[in-house]
Image: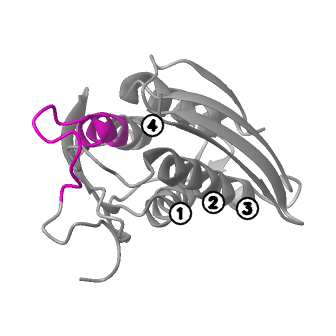
Amino acid sequence: MRSAKVERKTKETSITAELALDGTGQYKVSTGIGFLDHMMEQLSRHSLMDLALSAKGDLHIDFHHTTEDTGITIGEAFTKALGERKGIIRYGHAYIPMDETLTRVVIDLSGRPYFVWNVEFTKPKLGEMDTELFREWFQAFAFAAGATLHIENLYGVNNHHIVESCYKGLAKALRMAIAIDPRKSDDIPSTKGTLGGKA
């Protein structure tokens, strides 16, 4: 099983993430931020990656550090679990509808991080969480995971639906991209023979 454990400790946060890529979507999540917990559960359930996540941060200041550092830590665990990225499909995509909302997520596990975010919200907060922090989480994950990640909300009205469709879209795209190609299970899916770098 492709799995990894990463611990990240700073003056702002203390986070442990255990990730199993070939799981069944089991999760145990505690970040101190209810809505973020809900999104991490969606990520695990719909990607079929098992996730154990424990985060303690300076929530008395705001949710920024905990949200961003959670994305970094899960991304680092993801990179560690993937290893050489040998045999993976590499590319993944998903269109996720949630009632009136439709979101498209496309990913390339190239080892070269890049992030495109075409998502807008009509409210500054969902519950107690600033909506601008969702961009921070996805960007942190993409760069730590060595992924080219494009997320675009095509249309929608309800902010909860928009955010949740982004996380479910990432989950489904990851599930596709990390799958092992039975015809090329021993090969790295690149003409360069390696994934990463700037070429």
Of residue 57 and residue 77, the one placed in the foreground of this image is 77
Of residue 69 and residue 187, the one placed in the foreground of this image is 187
Q: Is residue 141 magenta?
A: no
In the drawing, what numbered circle is on residue 109? none
Which residue matches tag 3?
A: 65
Which residue in the rendered view is the most extreme toward the bottom?
Answer: 198
Using a 10 Å C-alpha cutoff, classify the residue at mark 3 as few (fewer than 14 neighbours), some (14 to 19) or many (20 or more): many
Q: Is mark 3 on a helix, strand or loop?
A: helix
Of residue 185 and residue 168, the one placed in the foreground of this image is 185
Amino acid under disc 1: Ala
- Label 4 near label 3: C-beta < 8 Å? no
Q: Of marks 4 and 2, which one's residue comes earlier in the chain?
A: 2
Image point (50%, 47%), residue name: 78
Q: Is residue 57 above or below residue 31?
A: below
Residue 190 in percent (x, y) is at: 17, 63
Q: Is mark 4 on a helix, strand or loop?
A: helix
The span from disc 1 to disc 3 (Cα, nearest Å) is 11 Å
18 relative to 180 in the view: left or right? right
Q: Of marks 2 and 1, which one's residue comes earlier in the chain?
A: 2
Using a 10 Å C-alpha cutoff, classify the residue at mark 2 as few (fewer than 14 neighbours), some (14 to 19) or many (20 or more): many
Q: What stretch is highlighted in magenta?
A: 169-189
Q: What element carries label 2?
A: helix
- Label 3 near label 2: C-beta < 8 Å? yes
Residue 138 in percent (x, y) is at: 46, 56
Amino acid under disc 2: Glu
Which residue matches tag 4?
A: 160
Which residue matches tag 1?
A: 140
Which residue matches tag 2?
A: 68
Q: Of marks 1 and 3, which one's residue comes earlier in the chain?
A: 3
